């Protein structure tokens, strides 16, 4: 493992793994400077680690500073963020409107999604981020902080997100917990 950590190039590694991620074959990875951030409806400036534009849903942008700053030990976080952004790409390519009855976020969800509710986002945009954050959280060890979430995503919401993404893409987005030695592995979505 010491040799792998010494030779670690997170951007090259992610480019190599990208086609194996859910929807990675239908969205191009672009590592770019996102340091200027985006203004949220609340008026605050949000610094971004990743971004997908409604106008270019076939391109996932990840912030170069974030990507190059990921340590070998934290590579799982890089995959989780990538799949978060790929879920946006999939939903935008499908029309961008998740079913309201399944994914609406309200004040009743404040116990697990208060950072998301405080962004000023509304309606479908709240749902888009909640779906993506729940997908991202599912790929990380329990208790790992996920932007937009204040606690574990409810199981019913997370499972509905997996089912929805599978329905619109034909791909199973559920990460597979598999114990493997620390070496090259066949699919990066098999968690490390």
Image (cartoon, rainbow, N blue to C red):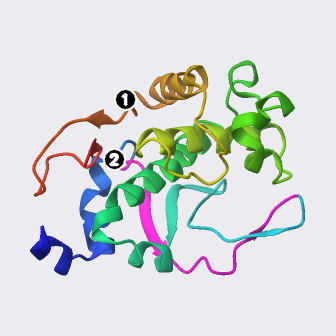
Coordinates of residue 147 in the picture (x, y in percent)? 62, 54
Q: Residues within 10 Å of mark 2 (few under 14, many from 20)?
A: many
Q: Pick whichever, 57 or 125, lies toward us.
A: 125
Q: Pick whichever, 6 or 120, lies toward us.
A: 6
Q: Which residue is mark 2?
A: 21
Which label was assigned to residue 189? none
- Vertical position of residue 20 compared to residue 155: above or below: below
Q: Which residue is mark 1?
A: 172
Q: Pick whichever, 191 or 25, lies toward us.
A: 191
Q: What residue do we see at 17% from left, 40% from top?
A: 179
Residue 130 in which image quadrant = top right
Q: What residue do we see at 24% from left, 63% from top?
A: 16
Badges 2 and 1: C-beta atoms under 8 Å apart? no
Element on which disc 1 rests: loop
Task: Specify start and end residues of the magenta stretch as a single range.
Answer: 24-41
Residue 55 in which image quadrant = bottom right
Q: Is residue 36 visible?
A: yes
- Vertical position of residue 119 compared to residue 50: above or below: above
For residue 63: magenta? no
């Amino acid at each position: 493992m010491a040799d792998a950590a010494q030779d670690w190039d997170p951007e090259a590694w992610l480019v190599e793994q990208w086609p194996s991620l859910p929807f990675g074959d239908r969205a191009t990875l672009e590592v770019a400077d996102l340091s200027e951030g985006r203004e949220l409806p609340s008026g605050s400036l949000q610094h971004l680690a990743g971004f997908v534009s409604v106008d270019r849903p076939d391109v996932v942008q990840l912030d170069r500073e974030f990507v190059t700053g990921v340590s070998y030990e934290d590579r799982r976080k890089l995959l989780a963020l990538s799949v978060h952004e790929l879920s946006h790409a999939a939903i935008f390519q499908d029309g961008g409107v998740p079913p309201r009855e399944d994914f609406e976020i309200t004040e009743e969800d404040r116990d697990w999604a208060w950072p998301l509710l405080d962004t000023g986002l509304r309606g479908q945009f709240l749902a888009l981020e909640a779906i993506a954050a729940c997908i991202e959280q599912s790929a990380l060890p329990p208790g790992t902080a996920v932007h937009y979430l204040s606690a574990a995503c409810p199981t019913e919401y997370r499972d509905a997100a997996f089912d929805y993404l599978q329905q619109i893409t034909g791909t199973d987005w559920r990460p597979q917990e598999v114990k493997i030695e620390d070496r090259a592995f066949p699919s990066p979505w098999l968690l490390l």
